[in-house]
Amino acid sequence: MNSKQRQQQILTIIDQKSKVSINELVELFSVNAITVRRDLESLEGRGLLKRYHGGASSNRGRSYEPPFLVRSNVHKKEKEWIGQKAASFIKDGDSIAIDVGTTALEVARNIKGKTNLTIITTSLRVVNEVISCPNIRIFIPGGIVNADEPSIRGELAVSVLENFFIDKFFLGVGGVDFSAGLSEYNFEDAQIKKTLIKNSKEIILTTDSSKFNRMAFAYVAPLKIVNRIVTDDELDVNSRKKIRDLGIDLIISNP
């Protein structure tokens, strides 16, 4: 395992546990403490964690969203499974909205072969993924370009999206909390999601299990508005029961 792979796994562990000790990492990776400290120093220098004596902890506030390239390598296999399963619910002739984010991009990667689709998205990565697919119409609202994602956001985008009525919205969020509901890292993205939720016949939440029991910065909607959740098999038993008690169709994706 090289340094890039170790550091990605360190981020995954901290994402799940909030903190990790150097001794844990030494044992996990079968490397010496000096190597682990170098990895932690590198990650701290990129603002991805905070070191303390004997370990490291999360450096993320509720409004902090890790860069796309970092997120794309966290729970990568789980997101691929989720994308494959979620895309299986798309029928020829559907009008669908695909959200921004790494898991939503996996949905887009699995729609090849579908025909007569209308796709509405603010994600420029999704556009690049589907633009060469035949028999698919793509609608992109105007607005402000968020170069980090990259995506479209702002009041103009919201006003354009209000004019569309959608069969299925493949929604991604920063956090899923059973009391606080669905939340996102920034207010602008939350406004886009609210508009698409309001105008969609079916809401399909596509998210890996690490997003559950977590709150991000900006409120989006109560969890009960979701019709179907597609996630991975690491979701805990208690969360599964709460989802089903809400009457939400829970799809557990695995190999």
Image (cartoon, rainbow, N blue to C red):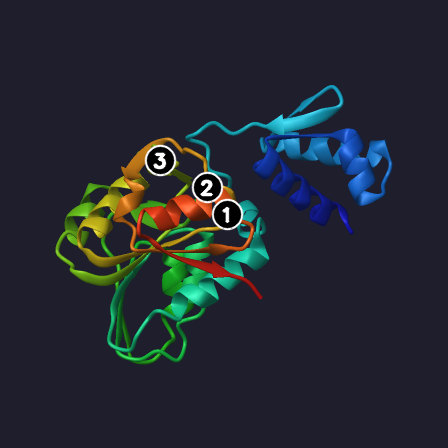
Report the side of 205 relative to 209 (left or right). Answer: left
Front-most of 229 and 39?
229
Kindly identify which numbered label has been placed on residue 240.
none
Name which residue type carries label 3: Asn
Name which residue type carries label 2: Phe
Q: Is residue 144 visible?
A: no
Q: Which residue carries the number 1 mark?
A: 209
Q: Residue at x 46, y 41 (%)?
A: 212
Q: Earlier in the sequence, mark 3 or mark 1?
A: 3
Q: Are marks 2 and 1 in contact (CB under 8 Å)?
A: yes
Q: Which residue carries the number 2 mark?
A: 212
Name which residue type carries label 1: Ser
Q: Residue at x 61, y 42 (%)?
A: 12
Percent coordinates x, y for residue 15 in the rendering: 57, 37
Kindly identify which numbered label has been placed on residue 186.
3
Residue that protrudes farthest toward the top in the picture = 53
